[in-house]
Image (cartoon, rainbow, N blue to C red):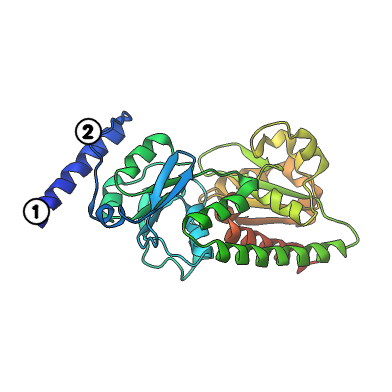
Amino acid sequence: MINKDWDKHIKLFLIVILNVIFLKGCYIFLPQKIYFENHNSIVSECRKVKHELGESCIPPNPQRIIVTDQESLESLVALGLKPIATTIANRVGSKADILKGKIDGITYLGKESQINIEKLVQLNPDLILGLWINPQEYKLFSQVAPTVSIGFTETGWKKTFKEMAKIVDRKQEAEKVLEQYQQRIEKLKLAFAQKPEKPEITVMRFYTDLKFTQFLNQKSFPVAILEELNLSIPLAQRQLNNSTVSYENVSLERVDLLEADAMFIALDPGAEENFQKYKTSRLWQTLNVVQKNRVYTVNSSYWIFGSVLSANAVLDDIVKYLLSNA
């Protein structure tokens, strides 16, 4: 039997090898599957789960879950679980504000696009979950622990949430959380129905390191939530929606497309300078929504992508600015 010191040396050697292979972008299967300590304890008893990239054998009660993105983190927290590690979003803000007190002590593995593989291995996970894990990463992660990749669309977040709940055996919890969300939607829908007119709402996003900005369309996460409330983006924006993506880039010369009864602007961290260029523009100042002070800045961490906790945070902002101030 290999002693602990020798086993540690083997692990470190494998970490180095895996990192070199991964960084070169040319993954090759090792002659035999690598099993770390946690694999040996779960290989005899597990539950097979089919997913986007294949089939994985999930332990019956995973205790050391790593999630590869903030949306998966949010979903598991909503289901009453606390992953041991996650990543930092590439552009949008951190979801820490809507997860206060629920992720204390969690380990961060770097940005979503640059996961620290060595740290991931050292954490000895028994399950790795993520949205749209690419095939190369999947092959790598699967050498460390059972890995599941889940498909995701911005408007299909409820389906994704249910799939994730099924994987971690929390289907009843998911149904309860979604039922509570739907009850809130119905209540707010009634509140807006009682208003004389339904407001048309523009949703924008400003980036930190990109000069352009954009408004979000019906394929986006926040606009889908607006539509649940029977609210809508302006007609001009709906007519322009011919793309397969969830946004439309807009220049200062076409700010007329942004005219609405209210405007929500999701700012990425550090995007204030980019936003300021629009705010000080004469064209921007011609918008009625600007002149009436109906422009509200919000956090991109939960307005751009998300699951049920982000959806509720979006509803909080909608109530705060469109109902409480009515």
Number of numbered markers:
2
- Identified at 73% across, 53% down, the residue is 226
Query: Percent x, y for residue 182?
Result: 70, 63
Local packing at callout 2 (Cα closer than 10 Å; few below 14, some 14-19, many 20+) is few
Kindly report the distance in space between the C-alpha atoms of the residues bearing marks 2 and 1. Answer: 21 Å
Residue hosting label 2: 31
- Identified at 80% across, 35% down, the residue is 239
Position of 262 compared to 151: left or right?
right
Local packing at callout 1 (Cα closer than 10 Å; few below 14, some 14-19, many 20+) is few
Residue hosting label 1: 1
Residue 204 lies, with reference to residue 104, above or below; the image says: above
Q: Amino acid at mark 2?
A: Pro
Q: Nearer the viewer, residue 179 or 111?
A: 179
Residue that protrudes farthest toward the right in the picture: 196
- Identified at 31% across, 46% down, the residue is 116
Residue that protrudes farthest toward the bottom in the picture: 101
- Identified at 67% across, 51% down, the residue is 222
| Residue 111 visible to the viewer | no
Query: Percent x, y for residue 250?
Result: 68, 36
Position of 306 compared to 228: left or right?
left
Position of 123 compared to 296: left or right?
left
Residue that protrudes farthest toward the top in the picture: 26
Dot 2 lies on which element? Answer: loop
Occupied quadrant, residue 313: bottom right
Q: Amino acid at mark 1?
A: Met
Position of 33 compared to 70: left or right?
left
